[in-house]
Amino acid sequence: MSQWTAICALLDIDDEDVMRFDNNGKTYAVFRYENQAYVSDGLCTHEKVHLADGLVMEYVIECPKHNGRFDIRDGKALGAPVCINLKTYPAKVEGGKIFADLG
Amino acid sequence: MQSKKISVPPRSREDYQLIGGAGDSAVDRGLVNAHWYKSPVSRPQMKQLMQRSDLPAIKDTCIWYACLGLAAAALVWTWGTPWAWLAFFAYGTLYGGPADSRWHEAGHGTAFKTRWMNDALYQVASFQVLRRPTVWRWSHARHHTDTLVTGRDPEIAALLPIDVPGMLLNLFAIRSGPRELWRALWNASGHISDAEKTFIPEMEWPQVIRDARKWVSLYAVLITSAVIIKSFLPLVLIGLLPGMMGTWLYTFFGLTQHAGLPENVTDFRENCRTVYMNPVFRFLYWNMNFHLEHHMYPMVPYHALPALHETIKADCPPPYTSTLQAYREILPTLWRQAYDPEYFVNRPVPKGETE
């Protein structure tokens, strides 16, 4: 059963951008693109750099350190130097707020 | 020039080995995958600076290859005359020199907005600059993670103590060029060195071998062409020879990046130089003279580095006002480091807020 955690208002994040969210000792990346929200682990699978400092280009987040790129919808690693997919979490927007199932 | 000596155990070339070198002690000292200082830049500014564009790199790439085409025409036209040596120098310089910065920027994925354009330029420039594409993609990732960390960074250009004759030979890749081809042959036969395995993930090893086999096929075509037309011209136009000829130019630019600056620090303001260069140099070098800025924020494209420099320069050591000024510091330092490897240049880092 889903346990939805409130993260922030959708408008707290610019469109085509990312924000860091820390919860219960873990760090996440929260993305907004075309008024949809996406949530993933916050650290790049290559060398644990915060993705929230990276660049969102449509559905792709690019790590700020080594250009590792992931699809924010499913966390798929899109080529070297990232080889391991990013873990993603179900997310939804309700009443202008972003919620994610971080379980 | 400010300089100082550090109190460290005596250095030897063995310290730089990726296996059995100083890497283990670097781990113990917290230098590996460490937190590096970054000058503050607001998120809206950084987002603006990181924006990609195809246009600047398309324009620059067209100009570069047009110049290369003209030089190639001059080489073919003068072939068989003494003027061919001059034409080969010009052609090789344009073939191999700017290929380094194109390899670099495309490897970061920041030259173009369009991914396939970065990938295509990366493959072509890697061949021109004599760097195996997958091996050097990963070695460069390591260089950015552990910049100038002894025993971890595989791309330190000025190993201590400085080997002056070796550096002079490598101005034309006399050692490094043939060695890289030999390593490509080794890879093509299905082998990867243990040292390279330390920074290339196992799932990328098959790609290293595929790359090498493509290179071997290309060289086979070149050699066959030379035999068929009974001329060295194909080998002078493409591959090892023009790549070696052009090495002096990117070495001239590249030594300004880190040479003479301290190893084993975690602040790019201490181990990277920003050097003001003229527009021709900046075109050939694709703004990598803003090297401190590039290391601090590697995802900022080359065409936005001057703007990034303006944004953070108050928090950085003063830039070198010219290439000449940089070399007035670098050459005496390298000369001294040939017999005193604990000596290095100490950059005046502004004292302010640190992370």
Image (cartoon, helix red, strand yellow):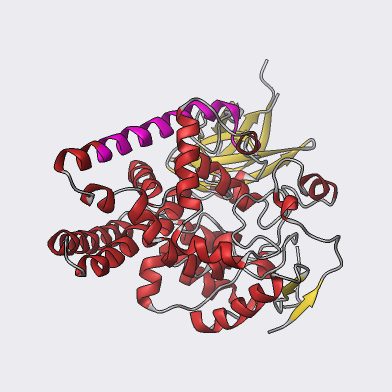
Q: Position of residue A14 (x, y in %)?
A: 51, 50
Specify the quadrant of the image occupied by residue B62. Answer: bottom left
- Please identify the dominant SS of the magenta region: helix
**What span is colored magenta in the figure?**
B198-223
Q: Is residue A16 visible?
A: no
The residue lying toward the viewer, choosing from B57 and B190, is B190
Check the image and report above or below for B132 versus B293.
above
The residue lying toward the viewer, choosing from B187 and B271, is B187
The answer to whether residue B203 is magenta is: yes
Specify the quadrant of the image occupied by residue A57. Answer: top left
Q: Position of residue B64 (x, y in %)?
A: 27, 61
Check the image and report above or below for A17 versus B329.
above
* Location of the C terminus of chain B (image quadrant): bottom right
Q: Position of residue A66 (x, y in %)?
A: 56, 47
* Location of the N terminus of chain B (image quadrant): bottom right
**Which residue: 45% across, 29% down?**
B188
- Seen from this angle, which residue lies furthest top? A1
Q: Is residue B200 visible?
A: yes
**Which residue: 66% across, 36% down?**
B198
